[in-house]
Amino acid sequence: MAVHAELTAITIDCADPRALAGFYRQVTGWDLGQADDDFVQLGAGPVRLAFQRVAGYRGPGWPDAAKHAHLDFAVADPEAAVQELLAAGATRPEFQPGDGDWTVLADPEGHLFCIASA
């Protein structure tokens, strides 16, 4: 039996929801939605990104077998997007799997995401 639930948001734990939502706003171009000191939602589509404050939050390591999840983004010009995201506060870990098919980046709090060609 399947529940057939509709995914409405992906919520990311973090130390500073407003700052992290601002970073991902630069990544996606989505508008800020519901927001308070502990929770910020980004986007108005069928699936949104949300960011919630967790006291004492520490970002994941990379590479690390205990990594939980990451986001994948497709862009028209991956090299230009990577440079723009690095300028916005992302970092590029040394370990880069995939033989150049995608680039692994970390957001300002250490959450991993990948940039690939659309």
Image (tube, helix red, strand yellow):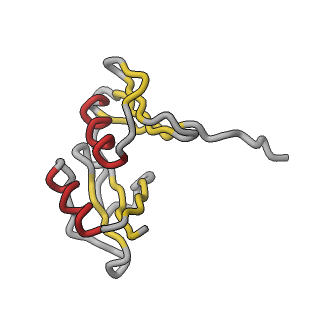
Instruction: Name the foreground residue: 25 vs 14.
Output: 25
Quadrant of the rendered structure where residue 22 is?
top left
Instruction: Name the foreground residue: 6 vs 2.
Output: 6
- Residue at 58 percent across and 37 percent down: it is 8
Quadrant of the rendered structure where residue 35 is?
top left
In the image, farthest residue toward the left: 87
- For residue 1, above or below residue 86: above
Q: Residue 88 at what x, y percent from top left?
A: 18, 48
- Residue at 38 percent across and 27 percent down: it is 40
Instruction: Name the foreground residue: 35 vs 108.
Output: 35
Q: Residue 20 at what x, y percent from top left?
A: 28, 37
For the C terminus, the quadrant is bottom left
- For residue 57, above or below residue 76: above
Q: Residue 17 at what x, y percent from top left?
A: 31, 30
In the image, farthest residue toward the right: 1
- For residue 77, above or below residue 20: below
Quadrant of the rendered structure where residue 104 is?
bottom left
- For residue 98, above or below residue 81: below
Task: Please give left or right for residue 63 compared with residue 50 in the image.
Answer: left
- Residue at 44 percent across and 52 percent down: it is 68
| Count of numbered marks | 0
In the image, farthest residue toward the bottom: 99
Q: Residue 113 at what x, y percent from top left?
A: 35, 56
- Residue at 32 percent across and 35 percent down: it is 21
